[in-house]
Amino acid sequence: MSFASTARSAPLVSAFRRTIWLVVVAVLAAGASCRRPPAPTPEVLALTTEALPLDPADGAWQRAPEHVAPLLPQDLVEPKLSKPSTPAVRVRALASASQVAFRLEWIDAAADDLPGAGRFPDGCAVQLPRSASVDAPDPQMGESGRPVEIVYWRADWQATVDGRDDTIQALYPNATVDHYPFEARSLQPGSEAQRQMARRYAPADAAGNRRGGLRQSAVEDLVAEGPGTIAPAPSTTSRGRGVRTPNGWAVVLTRPLPNGLGPRGRTQIAFAIWEGSAQEAGARKMRTGWVGLSMREAP
């Protein structure tokens, strides 16, 4: 082949190479657009990190792998739940040297966050054995001598923490009040008349009920050693925050690490969801059995 014919073929070779390159780029782009998100993990993996975000929308949660936990009606002890509601809860977890945090997200079309007679608030909970162990106690609230610890969140508590007043006007906007003792002029603080009035009109406060009145936290720590034994923990050290999503709730629950759970350790965890619009409360709930929980170093 002469130099002239080689020169004439050079533009054709360049055009061919450009065509091949464009085809390769198009194939790679198509593969990227069709790439599926990572498959959910078979157990909950808590990635270690220095700071644990309390905001469910914090970008740090996207680094944690997601576990999809199918839910079952609690139909083993009375009062049972006979009709399934929430199908699953999506869980991500992060852990520090002393704390572990869980982000729970589930579908719930209605936001049930008002207290009152005949009303049932939305809620969620995580349950762990008091001491980390692969051989966990019964997932139905533990066993005698083998307690479980529960962090419980409620939507009505969250609304109070977020600033909603605990007043008749806030809870019942269309109500008309002629007389309401809590809005009357205050009695002398510490006086016998004030104490009598408190016992009469605020029996929950007078009895030391921690669930009465305004709340400083949207969560409560509980302990149990079997069905029917659940009780408030001596104090609540856990934290939590829930927000509405376009189709339900996203809640972060943060608590101390269970005894014996350290880096690369493993234990069990269980979850529960209450849907207020389905009149779920107490034992009537959607729940899981034990799910594996492993600590992993962040990549």
Image (cartoon, grey):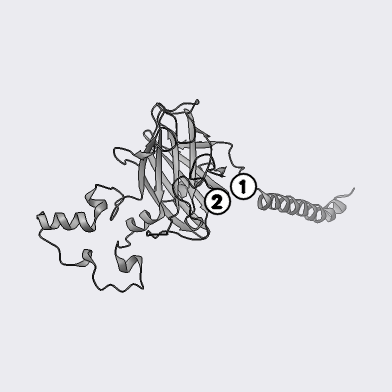
Query: Between residues 211 and 196, which one lies in front from this camera angle?
Result: 196
As displayed, is residue 186 above or below residue 228? below
Residue 7: mark: none
Depicted 286 relative to depicted 155: above or below: above
Going by the image, does 125 lie left or right of 182? right
Which residue is farthest right? 1
**Circle count:** 2
Q: Nearer the viewer, residue 54 or 74?
A: 74
**Of the numbered discs in the image, which one, if any, rests on residue 37?**
1
Look at the numbered disc 2 and give the secondary structure of its residue: loop
Residue 29 picture location, percent across and down: 68, 52
Element type at marker 1?
A: loop
In this rendering, position of residue 103 left or right of residue 211: right
Residue 209 screen position, x and y as percent: 28, 48
- Whether residue 4 sits left or right of residue 74 in the image: it is right
Mark 1 nearby-residue class (10 Å; few <14, some 14–19, many ≥20): few
Q: Amino acid at mark 1?
A: Pro
Label 2 sits on residue = 86
Q: Disc 2 marks which amino acid?
A: Thr
Q: Residues within 10 Å of mark 2 (few under 14, many from 20)?
A: many
- Look at the image and tell me whether residue 227 can be seen: yes
Q: Residue 140 at what x, y percent from top left?
A: 48, 36
Of labels 1 and 2, earlier in sequence is 1
Examine the rendered structure and indicate whether residue 253 appears above or below residue 155. above
* Quarter-of-image position of residue 43: top right
